[in-house]
Amino acid sequence: MIEIYLLRHGETEYNAKRIFGGRSNHLHLNEAGIKQATERGEYFKSTDFMVDEIFCSTAIRAKESLENVMKITNITEGKISYHDELNEIAQGDWVGKSIDDTLTPEILKEIAKKAPNFKAPNGETLGEGSNRIYKFINENILTKYKDGKFLIVAHGLLFRSFITKVTEMNPSMVFKLQCGNLSLSKICYHEEYGWFMHFFNRTV
């Protein structure tokens, strides 16, 4: 069986202020984000958490999250690699804008009606994002291994879109799922039984 752990990056100033970050690559962890990564590293150390391989987004906030975890404990003897395919779903003209002001009741109704084909102006559809990470996982994990434990360090909306896809959840649920900073989720793939969710959004 394949075990895949999904670790969202730590808090940035955009997260703290509830601003869309999207593909922005200038965002560093803030003080709270560094603390979250340190606590996650301490949790991994206390539970002897280990994986066979780590795949990380190329975004600064994802890299810094992994680096701060690894300062506390080494969680793999295998390869660590960084991939653009694991970057956040592009949020186009919404980047830099308030989440609460943007996601009006009207927009949420539009998302529910159009998902997974909904996208922010000049952005990427939810379906495109979920298909991107699904393709990545299929090519880099499922076609190469029959079993093993893997960690993906990436982004909240990307993870939520992926989870709604593989669990066959209504895609409109993507904005109703909470995926906190440095939260850990676990999803498994069995060759005979397919995908199933083990846990979601466990914070430290």
Image (tube, rainbow, N blue to C red):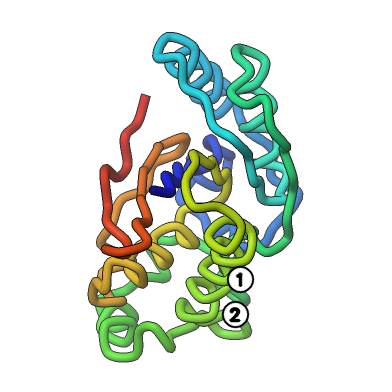
Q: From the viewer's perspective, is residue 155 above or below residue 75? A: below
Determine the residue positioned at 46% across, 53% down. Answer: 156
For the residue labelled by badge 2, is the local secondary structure a helix, a strand or a loop? loop
Q: From the viewer's perspective, is residue 33 above or below residue 101? A: above
Residue highlighted by disc 1: 90
Residue highlighted by disc 2: 123
| Residue 154: image tag | none
- The answer for how far apart the CA atoms under marks 1 and 2 are is 5 Å
Residue 83 rendering spot, x and y as whole percentages: 73, 55
Determine the residue positioned at 49% across, 39% down. Answer: 149
Question: Mark 2: which amino acid?
Answer: Gly
For the residue labelled by badge 1, is the local secondary structure a helix, a strand or a loop? loop
Report which quarter residue 95 is drawn in.
bottom right
Residue 20 rendering spot, x and y as whole percentages: 53, 60
Determine the residue positioned at 40% across, 14% down. Answer: 47
Determine the residue positioned at 47% across, 35% down. Answer: 182
Q: Is the Cβ of the residue at disc 1 closer than 8 Å to that at disc 2?
A: yes
